[in-house]
Image (spheres, coloured by chain):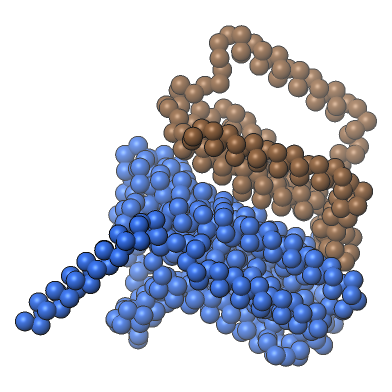
Chain colours: A brown, B blue
Amino acid sequence: MIGQEVLPLFFTFHFYLFGLVALVGAIIFVTRKSPVAAAMWLVVVMFALAALYVMIGAEFIGMMQVLVYAGAIMVVFLFVVMLLNLGHPSELGDMRGRFGRIAAGFVGLGLVAQLLALSRNALTPELVLPVGAALPAVDQPGGIIGPVAAPLFNEYLLAFELTSVLLLVAIVGAVVLAKKRSA
Amino acid sequence: MIEPTLILQLPHPQLPPSTGVFLIATVIKMIVIFTIYMVGVAYSTFAERRVSAWIQDRHGPNRVGPQGILQVAADGIKNIMKEETYPSYVSKALFVLAPGIAFVPAMMTWAVIPFGAPLPTLWGRIDLVVADLPVGFLFTLAISSLGVYGIVLAGWASNNKYALLGGLRSSAQMVSYEIAMGMSTVCVLLLAGNVSLNEVVQQQAQMGWNAFLLSVAAFIFLIAAFAETNRVPFDLPEAESELIAGYHTEYSAMKFSMFPISEYANMITASAMMATLFFGGWDIPFTKWDNTGDATVLKALLTFGAFATKVILFVLFYIWIRWTLPRFRYDQLMSLGWKVLLPMALVYVIVIAATVLALDMAGIARGPMFGAILFALNAVLMGGILFVLDKGRLISPAYSRLDRSRVERLRAMATGRSHLAGRGTGA
């Protein structure tokens, strides 16, 4: 198993490469007018994010990112977009009037200001790649899943079960809504 | 990073190699696997045609080369030489990209499938897997969930209603069966205690194949794998009697050819996953010789042979099913996925988890005894499931909604007609 401690440059290079892909993909995603093209660029962003997780040693999160976001949620997005067969791209703009544009501009500026403030803070040193930190986990009995699963089913069991109840509520709600419309 | 001395050093053949050797070996493994895989894909198209001919009592393609084995090359040349057509108003970028997107995920899965016992070389012990990822199994699930994009985009980009319907069907079908598939493999991970595919193979060598220990999971996985690869009886995205050719209606030449290629590629990948998860991977049955002791070249070759045999058998099984069963109706497909397979998989996870917990608490070590108890449980469960399925309650025939007397009358009419027809030919 070749890990980060052997090829740090390789991992660092790909971390920034996929970071760039994610940024560029996100910019293209928000500027597309065709919903299907936008959805596909979002898939690219999701994929690049998954690669980022893998590059910092969080393989499990990376795989979940692909499985849940790129593989399930985006497929359903595409399904809905195609099923609704939305009209011509030129009628689909989200920019609604002058007020909307001004509000969006202010929100964007606020976000940039927050990011700038964050980057000047003490958070920055922790954002450095934790080279080789995750690899010892591979040799444990549960493999790379063990360190994730153990706290989930011991310390945070209540939160975990409550989350599953929340999802169940969403599922039941969806079924109820779907039944009401067809009746 | 890669210094010449690292490559020139000769470590012990039973120890992991140095970084430089690892990188070179990985590149070689990638090239070899890619080559074998592509030839396998090409010849499974040939096998499909020959086996279908055999099943239907025909000859099949047998003119190009001895027994027609060069037919594959002839097909390839024909597809490249044909005219590429672009219908008007297609979304060109996605139209061109879709066949590639359909093919790539099937190939990527092969990166994590172990295909043999470790190979000892002068430069250290080489594991016969391209990338032994610690998240191996999750990687295969994640990548196979991307396979749907190729078909959906092809359907959407074609600017054709039949293609769009095919694409929509495929996305609904794949999402539905992915869940049952993922649930059925939870049991495998429960037994292996890890998501690394090498561990799954080791566990099966120790306790017996998962096909016997987790028969119900294997059964669900097999059905879901057929649906995921869009093979008969689940080939609704291209159902020709309803949708002309479904998602690839508007494609021609090599771009069309990429869809069958990706179908066979997916088929081989699904076969390899079946073999790895449920049929012991590269484990040779009835012997402990192949997974104990030092690695030898003979062991590596024989285990690779065992793995290849299993994969080929599953590919032939796929072909056999295609030429035996008719296609499902779309509502049958959906109710089978959501109302039968998913609840079955969920209940089965609970049953297996409880059994494993009980056996662990009873102090039974993971080994042949553990396997025998699980096998007995699964034999009972499997018998029950097949008994219920056989009753025709779950997937009912088309006439089940008709009145019983009406069915009787139609049957009588049908016998009367064949009786008349028989008299006609006799005269």
A47 horizontally vs B164: left or right: right
Residue at x 87% of width, y 53% of height: A153
Number of disc labels: 0
Q: Residue at x 76, y 49 (%)?
A: A61
Query: In the displayed structure, does residue B392 sit left or right of residue A59?
Result: left
Q: Nearest the camera: B388 or B350?
A: B388
Q: Residue furthest front?
A: B405
Inspect this view and state whether residue A84 appears: yes
- Residue B418 screen position, x and y as percent: 19, 73
Q: Residue furthest left?
A: B427
Q: Is residue B87 above or below residue B251?
A: above
- Give the quadrant of the N terminus of chain B: bottom right
Quadrant of the image occupied by residue B278: bottom right
Give the image location of residue B248, x and y in percent: 38, 52
Name which quarter of the figure residue B343 lies in. Answer: bottom right
Q: Report the residue at 81% width, 46% height from top.
A: A161
* Residue B26 at least partly seen: no
Which picture quadrant has residue B287?
bottom right
| Residue name at image x 85 percent, y 42 percent | A159
User: Residue B395, image x and y in percent?
Assistant: 47, 62
Position of residue A141 measured from the top left corner of the image (x, y, whole percent) = 88, 66
Say which of B209 and B371 sits in front: B371
Q: Is residue A14 left or right of residue B387?
A: right
As displayed, is residue A150 above or below residue B191? above
Quadrant housing the C terminus of chain B: bottom left
